[in-house]
Amino acid sequence: MRAWLLTRLLSAAWVVLGVASLVFLLIHLVPGDPVEMMLGESAAAADRQALRETLGLERPLLAQWLGFLGGALRGDLGQSLYNQQPVTALLLEHLPATVELAAAALLVTLLVALPLGVLAALRRGSGWDTGAMGFSLLGVSIPNFWLGPLLVLLFSLWLGWLPVSGRDGIASVILPALTLGTGLAAVLSRMVRSSLLEVLGEDFIRTARAKGLAPLTVTLRHGLGNALLPVLTLLGLQLGALLGGAVVTETVFNWPGIGLLTIEAIQRRDYPVVQGCVLLIALGYVAVNLLTDLLYARADPRVRLGGGA
Amino acid sequence: MGEKLLEVFDLRTRIGRGPRAVRPVDGVSFHIRRGETFALLGESGCGKSMTALSLLRLLPPAGRIAGGRVELDGENLLALTERGMRSVRGNRIAMIFQEPMTSLNPVMTIGSQIGEVLELHKGLRGDALREKTVELLDAVGIPDAARRHGEYPHQLSGGMKQRVMIAIALAGEPDLLIADEPTTALDVTIQAQVLDLLRDLQKRYGMAVLLITHDLGVVAQMADRVAVMYAGQIVEQAPARRFFDTPQHPYSRRLFQALPDSSKRDRPLTVIPGSVPPLDRDFTGCRFAERCDRAWLHCRTQAPGWFDTGADAGVLCHLFDPGLVPETAPEATQEAGAASPEAPAESGSQPLLVVDGLQVHFPIQRGLFKRTVGHVKAVDGVSLDIPTRRTVALVGESGCGKTTVGKGILQLIRPTGGSVRFDGDELTRLRGERLRKRRADFQIIFQDPFSSMNPRMQVGDIIEEGMVAQRIGGDRAQRRARVEALLQQVGLRPEHAGRYPHEFSGGQRQRICIARTLAVNPKLIVCDEPTSALDVSVQAQILNLLKDLQASLGLAYLFITHDISVVAYLADRVAVMYLGRIVEEGSVDEVLEDARHPYTQALLSAVPDIEPDSGRAIIRLQGDMPSPANPPAGCHFHPRCPKARDECRRAYPPETALSPTHKARCFLLP
């Protein structure tokens, strides 16, 4: 188990290094002169030279790379070109909003997807199944930039129950979380349904029934425990995407998270901030995937204890 | 004999709805007394498992019970509510299943899977629950039960898992245990252990057992009374002794005749022609009439009634109707004629295949950098000769490496060491195009004919593919003609070439696979358990076909199997493998009649004999075969060997020649 954990940690470290290097190269991959892109064509030559020196673009590439990695390790990602704040401070300022939204959206996803998927599997072929899967199809096909305004129209403008946008208290997180959660729940409930259906056809379910256990016990104790294993993997990927900042949703609701920061930074050609955002998003993915692996091992003894048929 | 525990009257089960509903159980009646073992015998698809599931009302979703009564101690189970039924399941009637590998929940500890029955039916909690669980694990012979209690199913071997299943069944202290093919998925030495255990527990707890099986040998070892099922009905019922002495129904008699053994070597096995009829239609006459050699017109027009032939015995057959005199019912004459022409002995001829010191090792890789930390020595020094026109059987239990030997010979897995000389060529040194060309000479037939054919290809294309790849058989028209000839040669019809594999029965699919190998005119065919997925009557057809082809085409077979009776019928020479090495080799008579290695002796004695109480001493092996990644020091067999001595722990025994053709590796031999 410890060797396994070490292997996972080491491979995660490799991914982070790779991402950091790609992010570093971002500035050099921009077509043309990055400084010109940032300042615009009409900038004065002195300003350009000053920026070039601030960014250290005069130094050899290798030195720049090592400098960037060293800085990143110390938590120094440079300064924003727009408002001169340290990038790290900007990220930390926006991170709580994103974590809050991700947690709320995940809650919505689980609360919707699990009951819906289980219900559809247990009542396979019935109206419940058709209804649940119809909802799921709808959820997948409605884009967030349309669902968001629709919810705003209904709950904020017509009913006046919830704020339109911004981040101000618990009420303001509901609509963005619903918007994000619906799409994810749609995918996840399908996964829960098909996975549970598959497990319910297994031999050990027959064994459990032959023991005289009640149907609910059979489904929850023997069925769901096994059915959630593949669901966990998907959930990890989804949570990674949530932490990476739901760019569209954050923009629609003017939610001050990482997604919004990224969009703004791109619009302002604030490259150091863009670099910081991308790095943070990648870190989020890696962290969540590591967590998923650990949870998976916790849930499946065949992974935890190795070997097995 | 005790009182009646379970009585089943005219049980009828349907799967699906409407006129095309399948009727796997169609009017079944029997009873089981307290403490006895009642065997339900039949081939696959005859409805025996569905009967068992109907008793517990555990049918698949599309199934329902359409009629009849099931009385447990006088109480009709079919009239109980679902809740009432749940207090019967696992409590008064428990069941164990065929596949121990998949019948346990992989994410729960075995202790908690046993414990939940105790909790549900016995109301045990906490320490008492744990204590009782450990006691049950102990009772089913799981060593170190207190520690094993917290283990997961994947940490146990197949035999151990079936013991856990039995412990789960015992937990409710049931009056009746239904065992559905309890040992079919297990090796023969493990099967012997599990059957012993079942017998012991039955005595100790006074349970009745409903044993469902297709294996006449298992029935002979276990049953007090036997019922034979065919196409959804019980066609014969009798006390076990009487059944094995004088089976009555034509189907029962054919089953016995289709069993391969050494006494039938020089003639073809009696086969039951055709296959079980589909159960989704009405029958006008006897369901077995189409396949029966004693059927006359009456059998086809009128369904037979049940005729008692003695105490607890009866038959569903017109032949036993005292009011009817059969027009012509000639006793089936043994088709002793047409004895397969004895293959001419090729004295002094070069063996076709010479395997010397074959090794196949698989590296075990661990950690971040996939370091090789050891080797699984699947095959570790196997030497073997196969002459033309001869059958050499390679016998052993699962995991002993016999399939890997086959693949290593065919170069489907490249051997790690040793030499494989085929017709003078060293195969291990052949590469690329030269090896590919040579492959026409040695072909393979697999255990599962369905999964070894591409389901999206037509049968004709499947057979032709080898000829195309080897650029033989002339132009397309000539190849198609050859495909048709091959289909006829294996007992199918030319028009079958245009169909797909799923349209055929298991036996027919294996015929197609045989035709596919014959297409490239091989000299050697490796047969890897070619009949172990087939029913006895179909197995007989395939064995006859293989024997005929050998005589007419001069083929050599390497026959890989775990089934001793098939070996006795078919093989000329036998090699017994244990943990990657051959421990004994000789002519079929030498090895089967005069086995000298303790493992061979144990293996042979563990095969259930169809003579009840044959009085044979059965050598019981303890434990499971060790892992080939970490074989025991010295003789690999010594930890399980009843005769092991000190020297056995120190070195691997050398080969001892017992006769010019018989050798074994054991220190006990002179």
Image (tube, coloured by chain):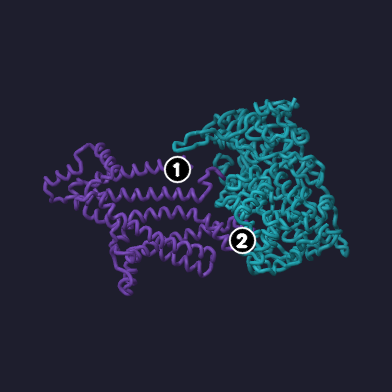
Chain colours: A purple, B cyan
Q: Position of residue B384 (x, y in %)?
A: 66, 31
Q: Please give the name of the residue rendered at 83% of the width and 57% of the height, measured from the top-left corner.
A: B1
Q: Position of residue A109 (x, y in %)?
A: 42, 61
> Within the image, what quadrant is residue B379 found in?
top right
**What is the secondary structure assignment of the residue under circle 1?**
helix
Q: Nearer the viewer, residue B628 or B104?
A: B104
> Within the image, what quadrant is residue B632 found in?
top right
Dot label at residue A186: none
Res A77 seen here? yes
> Which chain letter matches label 1?
A
State left or right for residue A247 relative to residue B655: left
Three-letter code, disc 1: Leu
State left or right for residue A4 relative to residue B521: left
Q: How crowded is the residue under tag 1: few (<14 C-alpha within 10 Å), some, or many (20+)?
A: few
Disc 2: which residue:
A213
Q: Position of residue B428 (x, y in %)?
A: 56, 30
- Total number of numbered discs in the rendering: 2
Q: Please give the name of the residue rendered at 41% of the width and 47% of the height, measured from the top-left corner.
A: A290
**What is the secondary structure assignment of the residue under circle 2?**
loop
State left or right for residue B397 relative to residue B207: left
- In the current view of this chain or complex, which residue is farthest to the bottom? A158
Q: Are marks 2 and 1 on the same chain?
A: yes
Disc 1: which residue:
A5
Q: Please give the name of the residue rendered at 45% of the width and 59% of the height, measured from the top-left corner.
A: A188
Three-letter code, disc 2: Leu
Mark 2–mark 1 Cα distance, whole angstroms, equals 37 Å
Q: Are marks 2 and 1 in contact (CB under 8 Å)?
A: no
